[in-house]
Amino acid sequence: MYKVRTYNQISVKGLERFPRLHYEVGSDIGSPDAYLLRSQKLQGLEVPKTLLAVARAGAGVNNVPVGEYSKLGIVAFNTPGANANAVKELVMAGMLLATRGILSGLGYVQTLTHMTDAAEMAQLLEKEKSRFVGGELKGKTLGVIGLGAIGSMVADMALAMGMKVVGFDPALSIDAAWRLSNAVTRMENLPSLMARSDYISLHVPAMDATRHMINEDALASVKKGAVLLNFARETIVDPDAVLRALDQSKLGRYVCDFPEPAMLGRSDVIAMPHIGASTEESEENCAVMAANQLMEYLESGNIVNSVNFPAVSMPRTPGTWRITFSNDNVSGVLGHVLSVLAEHQVNVIDMMNKSRSELAFNIVDVEHQPSAAVVAAIEATQHVIRVRVIDR
């Protein structure tokens, strides 16, 4: 029986993925094998010795102490792409709100509560509507910074609206490149994208390399009057630099999902209350994906969408026992473990080894159940972090 402790309100559809015969799931589970959470901050919380994996139902993992967990061999998962459509649609709403006189027009209409004659109101609105004239997106250029799951969908959406799209992503993966439309013009650097774009939409992860990516230097190249949209993470933008760019009319508007006190009350800032992924569909998609990833890892040792360990997946050979172990990514570890198995006459049926940065992960299917002595010998191997045995 696997134990999964939940934090926050997890979609029922995600929780229903766990078969009750094999899983105990709840918010008060002791000695959990896994955590399933949304926004709960795990930094500073005691880590149970039983904890094998953590799944964040969402893309960002800034609430998960990934570095600490890596040293303990705990696999951290996220759900990239599960909330992509929700964010994409809000980006479109943000562009339209920034372009048309929608908000000011709505506000004006609500000041007319004193009027009782519909014909008189219609006549007044016909006269005043010129105050709310805006522009159109068609023919304008959207610059997309970060061309992953969400960025590529935003690019496709903009193309369908008749916009031109340029993109910049220094870490573009092969999978992301295949998803990207050939109608998107790739920029070699950030300044060139900033200079060409009427709208700039951010879709990079929050990490040290992207902290204040949009700063004074980046905004020095921005096309005058451009609209900056941030539905990624607050740390990607230097808010003081953005406010100065607005004050100097370098930026026309700033649309974001991360309000800050200094931004309130400004007509050139449209701030939303972090609702980018707040749709029923998105929450269900994230919960289902997170649950599936946890089950796959707990039951088979396979890793999909981990933020700290390599992707590794090997079909199970029927009738075998499975050993998985994580280790520091240094030479000689796998060879030593295989020597241990040979010394104890443990026959290896199949195996796979993958590495990612400073970590490696191994799956080894063996013919018979490994003894406690075998497991202890593997655990004693220098640079081995964690060992598991998954029965047949």
Image (cartoon, grey):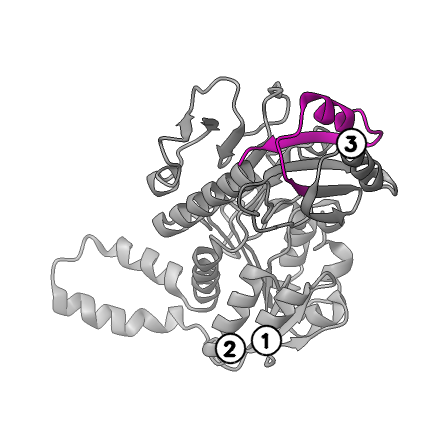
Disc 2 to disc 1, C-alpha distance: 7 Å
Three-letter amino acid code at disc 3?
Val
Helix, strand or loop at mark 2: helix
Hey, which residue is sitting farthest front in the picture?
Answer: 345
**Category of crowding for the residue at label 2, using alpha-carbon neighbours closer than 10 angstroms: few (below 14), some (14–19), many (at least 20):** some
Helix, strand or loop at mark 1: strand
Pointer 2 residue: 159
Residue 165 - label: 1
Comparing 345 with 55, the one in front is 345
The N terminus: image quadrant: top left
Q: Earlier in the sequence, mark 2 or mark 3?
A: 2
Q: Earlier in the sequence, mark 1 or mark 3?
A: 1
Hey, which residue is sitting farthest right in the picture?
Answer: 331
Disc 2 to disc 3, C-alpha distance: 49 Å
Three-letter amino acid code at disc 2?
Leu
Q: Position of residue 73 (x, y in %)?
A: 69, 32
* Residue in view at x 47 percent, y 53 percent: 82
Disc 1 to disc 3, C-alpha distance: 47 Å
* Residue in view at x 34 percent, y 43 percent: 13
Residue 277 showing in the rendered view: yes
**Category of crowding for the residue at label 1, using alpha-carbon neighbours closer than 10 angstroms: few (below 14), some (14–19), many (at least 20):** many
Q: Position of residue 350 (x, y in %)?
A: 67, 48
Residue 198 showing in the rendered view: no
| Residue 377 is a magenta residue | yes
In-image side of 114 versus 226 (left or right)? left
Three-letter amino acid code at disc 1?
Val
Q: Could you tell me if the residues under marks 2 and 1 are in contact, i.e. CB atoms within 8 Å?
A: yes
Select label 2 or label 3 by which is in front. 3
Pointer 3 residue: 384
